[in-house]
Amino acid sequence: MPSILMRLLLFVSSYFPLSVIFFVLLLSNHPVTAILILSFGTIGLIGLAVYLRFVGRLGAIRVKIKDFKSRDAESMSYIVSYVIPFLAIPFSSVGQGIALSIFFVVLAILYVNSNMIHINPMLNLGHYHIYEVTLEDETVHALITKRRIVRGESLSTIKVGEDILLEKQA
């Protein structure tokens, strides 16, 4: 299971697109803040890439898919939280910046403690698919994979979180 630091980096990576949007919106009036926000998002994105490369080296377990449902749309609901910051733009007061920071801290705590690492739009942008799978032993897991799966298929996976599997790439 990923460490708290890794889950935090995965959370930050999920907001990389928003950091780019903030960068563009803030660059002309608040260049230092814009660069800090983009740097923060970039660190998360690099963390995600390093994490995916690292876990790919771990030992795999073989699982057989009994049933599945696509969960790619879950990332779309996550995008709703992207809308909230636009209510606070432009940053006309320090209070708005603090309020927005509190919002992101609360989101980070929920994301990390709820083990929601698979709900990350950057995974979708990286051509990963998210499934809820029922295995042959009747356990239910989230599965992150780069391809479409079929019932009855056996996969080589790595456990990356509580009830979260990542298909190991060949």
Image (cartoon, helix red, strand yellow):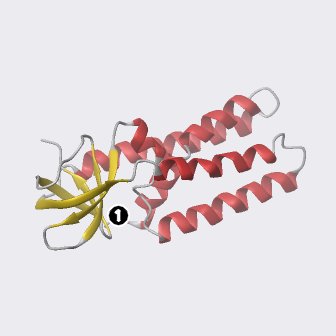
121, 22: nearer the viewer: 121
**In the picture provided, is 137 more to the left or to the right than 26?**
left
Give how far across and how far down residue 58 sits, in percent. 17, 56
| Residue that lies at the very extreme toward the right in this rendered image | 92
Question: Which secondary structure lies at badge 1?
Answer: loop
Please name the residue shown 52% across and 47% down the image: 76
Please name the residue shown 53% across and 51% down the image: 12
In what quadrant of the picture does the N terminus appear? bottom left
164, 7: nearer the viewer: 164
Residue 27 falls in image quadrant: top right
Could you classify mark 1 by the number of other residues whose Cα lies within 10 Å: few (under 14), some (14-19), or many (20 or more)? some
Give how far across and how far down residue 39 sits, in percent. 58, 39
**In the picture provided, is 107 more to the left or to the right than 49?**
right
- Tally the marks: 1
Give how far across and how far down residue 153 sits, in percent. 11, 52
**In the picture provided, is 67 more to the left or to the right than 144?**
left
Q: Amino acid at mark 1?
A: Pro
Please name the residue shown 41% across and 41% down the image: 124
Residue 22 falls in image quadrant: top right
| Residue that lies at the very extreme toward the top in this rendered image | 28
Query: Mark 1 — residue?
Result: 2
90, 37: nearer the viewer: 90
**Depicted 70 relative to depicted 64: above or below:** above
151, 41: nearer the viewer: 151
In what quadrant of the picture does the C terminus appear? top left
**In the picture provided, is 129 more to the left or to the right than 105?**
left
